[in-house]
Image (spheres, helix red, strand yellow):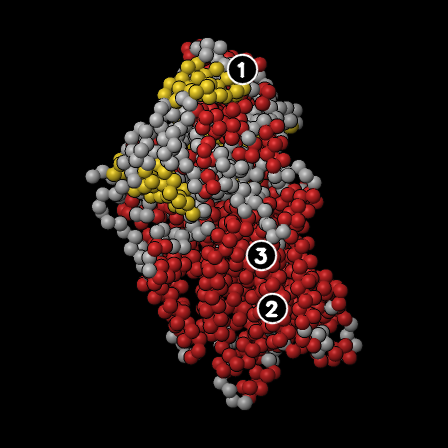
Amino acid sequence: MVRAIARRLATGAVTLLLVTAIVFALAAMSTGSSLPGESVEDTSPLTPEQRAEIRALYHFDEPLHVRYGMWLQDLLRGDLGRSFHDRRPVAAKIAERLPATLALNAAALLLMILVSVPLGALAASSPGSLLDRAAGSATYALYSIPVFWAALLLQLAFAIRLGWLPLYGTQTSGMEAAPLVARLHDRLAHFVLPTVCLAYPGFAYLSRFVRGILVDNAAAESARAARARGLAPSAVVIRHGFRQAAVPLLTLAGFLLPRLVGGSVIVETIFAIPGLGHLFVGAMFQRDIPVVMGLTLLSGAATLGGVVAADLLYAVADPRVRRA
Amino acid sequence: MRARAADRIDGTRGSLRKAAALPRPRPRATLAAAAAALLVLAVACGETARRDEAVRDDVRAAMAAFPTSLSLIGKTDTNSEIIARLVTDSLVQYDATLAPRPRLAESWDLAADGREVTFHLRKGVLWHDGTEVTASDVVFTVRKVREPATEARSAIGQFESVESIEAPDPATVRVRFKEPCADPLDPFTLPIVPEHVAGKDPDILTGRFAEHPVGCGPFRFVRAVPGREIVLEANPAYWDGAPSLRRITFTVLPDERTAYGALLRGDLDLLGVTPDVFRDAATNPQAARLRRFHYFMMSTWYVGWNGDGSNPFFTDPSVRRAIVLALDRPAFIGAVLGGLARPAVGTYHPDSAWANRSLEPWAYDPAEAARLLDAAGWRMRPGGTRARDGVPFSFTLTVPAGSQEITDRIAAWFQESVRKIGVEVSIEKLEWRTFLDRRRAGKFDAVMARLNLSPSPDQFELYHSSSRGRGMNFMGLADAETDRLLEEGRRTVDPAARRKIYDRLQVRLHELEPLSCLFGFAAPVLVDRRLEGVEPSPLGLWTVLPGPRAWRWRR
Amino acid sequence: MRSPTPGCAVPRRGHLPRGLVAGGALIGILAFFGIAAPFVATDRPLLARGPDGWSSPAARSAFGLPDAPAGRSATAVVMAPIPRAPETIQLDSVLAPPGPGHWLGTDGLGRDVGSRLVHGARVSLAVGFLSAALALLVGLPLGALAGWSRGPIDAAVSRGVEAMLCFPSLLLALALLASSPPWLSALPDSVRLALVLGITGWTPAARYVRAEFLKLGGSALVDSARASGAGSLRIAVRHVLPHAAAPVLVTASFSVGSAILLEASLSFLGLGVRPPTPTWGGLLTEAAAHLERGWWLALLPGAALFLSVLGCNLAGEGLRDRLDPRSRP
């Protein structure tokens, strides 16, 4: 078992290396003739010599493999490099944004599960019923609302018209000195709207997914046997269904995590939460290669970690796979 | 609108409640708990952002993005310039009439040959740490700006013409130019940084100075949280009188609607907005405490024609003009932009002293447009499109993609308008970097974007034939008379003679139309009625003289 | 349809599940509007009478023919239900609410929303369905191959899937669309977008199918099928693949909607469909600028999107009921 895990991790590392190389090439090749952070129309532009000097500062004219080699070398020394955009250390930029993103995504994932799993179970307990169809339609309707729209409407209702919740940010400015309870309260209030916005599009997919698996499993032999033993239908769904559902749910979880990080860009922008999604997209547009690479490394490692963990749990949950 | 928002939210809750009411024990418990938790959070966390009505002494403003750098001179963008102009001072700075005014320089002398300027510095001006500002700080700043590693993008090109700069004594700065310089003052609107602080960092962009900048301006830097906020406070020892405001807080709000919401809630005191929001504020009861005004920005919305011969259309000035004549700009401004723009005539800001006021924007005249195209050989074909020698008049308009939805509206209107005179346009949207790359390489038929204007009359980089392929002259303009006027304008020191040269240049450019300026946009502003002294200016609210130094709350 | 025992709401063979019928019908209607857009919403007469007799200017323009020489002087006899072209700008009726002149109102440039909505169906549905189909086309065989053959092929495919998961898919899409290699930019907008979205979206299908093949590879089901003389391909397609139907179909039917929404974000970044071609996503993005003054701008594209997502999922669930062996009695 231990050797299997080690082998799995090693192949994961190789995959990650490959991915970073490809991302590096993609990002570097699309830099073109521009300079880092070139973003305004300049009426007094640089001379070709000045452009060349600035490009040299960032090794823009070195061959691709040399630049990737430099990046790897720095990485082995534990240095993620400095951002092309503002020349601050990439590690610092990621570190100051990581907590907000993690908290937001964890909260959204939790809300998604809290809503979708019971809803899916409920729908699965009587497939084809009015309840099933209503739950389906309602979640599809939610899914069809673009996030930026939902965010605007929620802000308008709860933060602007009613004034119940804060409009933006993760905390009220100057709250650092407040007592712990007040600070916690302030934080929680700030997270309500962004969490809802990040979670609701997932309700449909997750609840339908859960329903689909539970319905399948309810029809399976073991469940029929259980029913024959006189168990109530709902008990069959829950006891037998969920045990069987664990495997595909784990597979799904492996996918959801990295997608959440990417999917939070719009929410982060609208709610003015400086998080990783915003940093990532900004960096891509600015061709800020060190930041793109740092984030690719981070999300790649998280994804592969998740996949490996899911595979292992999978083996534990399903004896057939363990044998294979 | 309000009813709809409520509908949707109730709809969501309704389905939750309905689900929870069904007799399924375990899911119900979980659901009810989740719903209850949400509701409790929603209601209990209602925070009171309403401020008390006592007289205020601080201003809360928004920034669309955190400044790239707080080093005051390096990696400058719009937002870092605002911070730089509040935190420190320059030798001269423009007022609302775009005239340069003495700041750290009390006075200056221009040499008769136009190649030298001597600044006499104001004495007794102190940095925020109490040290006196000297001529060597100025020399240091210029040296630093000219280092490529500082990446002072907008300034580095301006100092290209400076041959030497020296400080013969602590109160004098002498600048020698490589050739006669038309506008020796313009480069010296550069914010000055203290040598004894900034000079300690080997890299000005990453050192301690960039984390906590020190200046000599009306406001002192207090703190910044990257990506979130910047706080400044008044400098009571400012040489030109302490500002009335005690504190300015900038919150980073990337989404313009969120920023508007924050203004409506009372979290902000003033905000630059979009025309759509501006219109809403006129009727929104929550916006009653706000004063609405607008100013015309130092920018123009242009279409640049590629006249280098790579396409058969735009080497002919009459064709370029014909396209502009087909655009009914006043109608578009009225219907789509809510009146918050005006047709532009050229790249000289209409409020600038250098603008040639005898020139008028081309008026809408589709008949004349058709006549010009006919005369140029582009004749109407049966299908309703024009062609010359079998080549259809069909070109690509390249626009930068971005958050500005207005680009789409202008592009669609442009396309429809010229279709009516038989010209086909396809629109190509490129991501900003790609757009710049393509424009620099001259790989386009026509480009449309926004151009920032300079208060200086010298537009050598934009129109001189020697700037082709390297700078802003992406149109490929090579006109002998334009070149001659630009060169003469740079050499001439006598104000009246210069005025004549630039008047003539503008007439020539209007005939040639290498770059058609479509609109000058207004920047609409919403500001709390009780905050006085916030005045429109082409430079905006923050970087102009006197700027926030003159703002005060009404008692 | 409602059955007394949960889990047995399964139709007999030969009867189509009701969801499949309803979903198919919904998508059929939307697709009809998309395909027939040049006849449903156009400013050219469907039927006109001129000096040369009867003609159909709408049909001529739909098939890319120039107007007949006499077309302009013909008198319109039958107009389209929405007699407006999607690009026509009317600066004198900007943001007009739904009414007699414009059934579904106008947008910020006075363009007819109904016309734009109908024409938008073409690109949006094409992008949605093509990208989902592409994802299945790549994902199913790869997943099946990996799960079936195990060994080195499985390892290669699995690492490929993992690598795809690590990629910032937006970067991949941006790099492909922004660099626009000639073969890619030569394609029509909808195919180009579908290709890029399909390339980045095939992994879930591959993963689910692979898992199912791994699970059933050595099971009694396969052994018995093999014993009865079925070939590998037949076993894979007839006996194993249907077991993966549930998650794969749910995923695929959602990917149609998400592709339509993704097109909106890509349009927003300027890498989507070229203006002025309307798309539902583009309409929704435009609507955000007129939040206060034009409620109809978002409501209708949103409803269209909802109906297509609902249709896909109804059809997907119905199809699964029909295919999935576990849900058969």
Is A16 rendered above or below residue B251?
Answer: below
**Residue B56 figure quarter:** top left
Disc 2 residue crowd, few under 14, some 14–19, many 20+, Cα 10 Å: many
- Amino acid at the residue labelled 1: Glu
Q: Nearer the viewer, residue C108 or A51?
A: A51
**Residue A252 figure quarter:** bottom right
Percent x, y for residue B298? 42, 29
Q: Nearer the viewer, residue B208 or A287?
A: B208
- The residue at 57%/39% (across/down) is A36
Tell me, yes or no, whether dots 1 and 2 are on the same chain.
Answer: no
- The residue at 50%/68% (across/down) is A207
- Amino acid at the residue labelled 3: Ser
Q: Is residue A117 left or right of residue A21?
A: left
Is A140 rendered above or below residue B412?
Answer: below
Mark 1, secondary structure of its residue = loop
Q: Nearer the viewer, residue B418 or B266?
A: B266
- The residue at 29%/55% (across/down) is B48
For the C terminus of chain A, the quadrant is bottom right
Percent x, y for residue C181? 67, 42
- Amino acid at the residue labelled 2: Ala
Mark 2, secondary structure of its residue = helix
For the N terminus of chain A, the quadrant is bottom right
Mark 3, secondary structure of its residue = helix
Q: Is residue C63 left or right of residue B513?
A: right
In 3D space, how far apart are the residues under numbered discs 1 and 2 (Cα atoms)? 71 Å
Q: Nearer the viewer, mark 1 or mark 2?
A: 1
Q: Which label number is shown at residue A299?
A: 3
**Residue B119 figure quarter:** top left
Q: Chain of mark 1?
A: B
Q: Which label number is shown at residue A310?
A: 2
Is B525 rendered above or below residue B371?
Answer: below
The residue identified by callout 1 is B179
